[in-house]
Amino acid sequence: MYAPRVNPSLCSPKQAARIGRTVAPLLAASSTSPCQAYSHGVGVRCTAVFVNQITSPASTQRCFSTTPANRLRDFFPAKETAQIRTTPPAWPHHGYTRAEMLAVVPGHRKPETFGDKFAWYLMRTSRWCMDTVTGMSKEQKSDKKKPTTAVKAERPLTEEQWFVRFIFLESIAGVPGMVAGMLRHLRSLRALKRDNGWIETLLEESYNERMHLLTFMKMCEPGWFMKFIILGAQGVYFNAMFLAYLINPKICHRFVGYLEEEAVHTYTRAIHEIDQGYLPKWTDPKFEVPDIAVTYWMMPEGHRSMKDLILYIRADEAGHRGVNHTLGNLDQKEDPNPFVSQYKDGQKLSPMTNPKGWEREEVL
């Protein structure tokens, strides 16, 4: 493909790069060999994270992205300043071994109390709504009798459909930790007493979910429809979680535990379809994960594929699953956070290894 060049003496390097990115797709559109893949899924347009030629999808698919090809952009480019070189993560990731990530499996905590059942059925309703809005067909759905463990379906999802689900899921998953941490912080100030380690864990969870979203945003650009859905969902979810956490935080943590079960299931199915060869764009040797992911998870050389990225994210979700199911079993006002506590026998809890969480008597 012909790459346009701009005389740097006529403008700044940043302006030159911007003009070059704008003109390149216009020249590509006039050529006979396509160099840009358009995503006609529900509300996202995939950016050029792989450079092999790809044919356009059928025109019968719904397209909710109105962004022209020549306006694809980096959503949050690094802003250069005269003094600052880089801004590291506020909560550096603690990292995983390969064995730890591969050991993660889908799991389900059977609802027992009325609060558990309420949280579970609310989660199932939310899942149905997401499937409906994102256009998932009946053949693409897994076994309804095993909603959080079955990973096989009659027809796989496309890469574009997966990005839709990832972005929508992560835009929602980052809300509960922030709401809970904020409310516990304010209560600690009002009561003039410590929170016993809950606030930090909840805020870090929210931060981690946001990093998942930012990573996917580096690979896809939502259209106006997707942005509208996210805006509406966040508005409803934030306010509902705010009120619910004031009334019954136990049910809220149980609901988030079930939400994380769905997340682990979602990423496990994506890994399964990658292994089965259903997602060739993600297994292309030229595919590259964003630098933000490499830096945050400290991904080693040779392990920076899309599958590796999803393994890291799935391990994060498994940890959140175990944390919230455990916190939902504790006394919300008095019990310390077992995941940051030092035990007398030296043990350290690993929430990603326990899908159902720990009961109160097991950790206290």
Image (cartoon, rainbow, N blue to C red):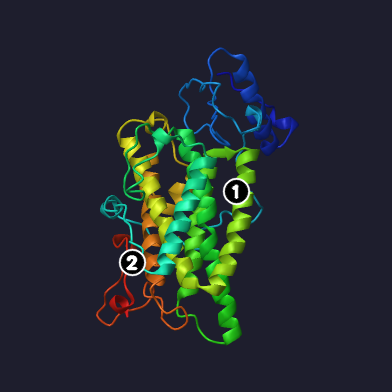
Amino acid carrying label 2: it is: Gly
- Local packing at callout 1 (Cα closer than 10 Å; few below 14, some 14-19, many 20+) is some
Q: Secondary structure at mark 1?
A: helix
Q: Is residue 130 above or below residue 23?
A: below
Please state if 8 lies on the left or on the right of 124 as rendered: right
Please state if 23 lies on the left or on the right of 356 as rendered: right
Please state if 360 lies on the left or on the right of 51 as rendered: left
Sequence-earlier tag: 2 or 1: 1
Q: Residue tagged by mark 1?
A: 230
Amino acid carrying label 1: it is: Ile
Q: Which image quadrant is residue 19 in?
A: top right
Can residue 302 be seen in the rendering of this structure? no
| Depth check, front residue: 18 or 318 | 318
Q: Looking at this rendering, what residue extends furthest in the bottom direction?
A: 192
- Locate residue 86, reporting x and y percent: 56, 54
- Locate residue 302, reporting x and y percent: 33, 41
Dot label at residue 361? none
Classify the position of the C terminus by image quarter: bottom left
- Locate residue 156, reporting x and y percent: 38, 33
Q: Residue tagged by mark 2?
A: 357
Q: Is residue 156 above or below residue 77?
A: above
- Local packing at callout 2 (Cα closer than 10 Å; few below 14, some 14-19, many 20+) is many
Q: Residue at x 44, y 37 (%)?
A: 288
Q: Secondary structure at mark 2?
A: loop
- Locate residue 221, reporting x and y percent: 58, 38
Contact between marks 2 and 1 (CB within 8 A): the answer is: no
Q: Which image quadrant is residue 107 in?
A: bottom left
Q: Residue at x 66, y 25 (%)?
A: 23
Q: Residue at x 51, y 64 (%)?
A: 177
Q: Which image quadrant is residue 220 in?
A: top right
Q: Gap in Å between the C-alphas at discs 2 and 1?
A: 29 Å
Can residue 333 be seen in the rendering of this structure? yes
